[in-house]
Amino acid sequence: QQKVQQSPESLIVPEGGMASLNCTFSDRNSQYFWWYRQHSGEGPKALMSIFSNGDKKEGRFTAHLNKASLHVSLHIKDSQPSDSALYFCAVSGGSNAKLTFGKGTKLSVKS
Amino acid sequence: GPKVLQIPSHQIIDMGQMVTLNCDPVSNHLYFYWYKQILGQQMEFLVNFYNGKVMEKSKLFKDQFSVERPDGSYFTLKIQPTALEDSAVYFCASSLWSQNTLYFGAGTRLSVL
């Protein structure tokens, strides 16, 4: 059964700083990886997806995938207070088609 | 962006009663999902649904749970009877295809007393 683990559990960064979130997964056949962001009182919203090894940049957000090391990460440059939220790594493909979420990283950006 | 609507936003019921949670998915989406979240923590997969059938379900999807989407209307999650441990926020999601981005609703907070 797919296991998705995220670290750290919580993270505080200053406004304008860099936030780095990590995620490991257990199923080597996993194919599809997303980062979702959830603000308090709302449903999760997809931030970005990454399907190939390497980096993918969208604005201030960069995702990195290394399937061999079962690792995916998200880096947020120039963090803003509005980035404060719960960030989930989500993985699918391989033996399970369903999307499996990690427990989340709570990011707080302090101005 | 695409919107998934969930009704009601909050439901309070007594243990043992039946409850139906309603979801209006994105109009052209074909896959539908329910997830459960307790205390703002992990999103736990319950079930996915395609072409009128349950495709996959987790151990959390107990025998008391059922899903349906009659005639393209609301996608519903019914719990009968409810138990105290069913208290949680239930999120509905939809996607165009399997392995596509999921779009989530704002959730229904279910409180079982």
Image: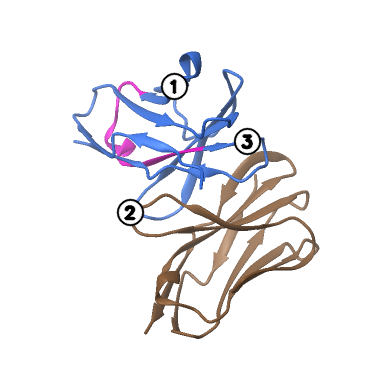
Chain colours: A brown, B blue
Across the whole image, how many numbered discs are drawn on residues?
Answer: 3
In front: A43, or B58? A43
Circle 1 sits on which residue?
Answer: B66
**What stretch of residues is rendered in magenta?**
B79-93
The chain that hosts pointer 2 is A
Which-is-in-front pick, marks 3 and 1? 3
Q: Residues within 10 Å of mark 1 (few under 14, many from 20)?
A: some
Amino acid under disc 2: Gly
Q: Give how far apart the Cα atoms at labels 1 and 2 are.
A: 26 Å
Q: Position of residue A105 (x, y in %)?
A: 48, 66
Amino acid under disc 3: Leu
- Quadrant of the rendering where the N terminus of chain A is positioned: top right
Numbered label attached to residue B54: none
Q: Residues within 10 Å of mark 2 (few under 14, many from 20)?
A: few
State the SS at label 3.
loop
Circle 3 sits on which residue?
Answer: B96
Q: Quadrant of residue B82?
A: top left
- Quadrant of the rendering where the C terminus of chain A is positioned: bottom left
| Residue at screen point 39% across, 60% down | A39
The chain that hosts pointer 3 is B
Q: Quadrant of residue B88?
A: top left
Residue A36 is inside the magenta segment: no
Is there CB contact under 8 Å for labels 3 and 1?
no
Q: Residues within 10 Å of mark 3 (few under 14, many from 20)?
A: some
Position of B92 with respect to B56 (left or right) is left
State the SS at label 2.
loop
Amino acid under disc 1: Ser
Q: Position of residue A6 (x, y in %)?
A: 56, 64
Numbered label attached to residue A41: 2
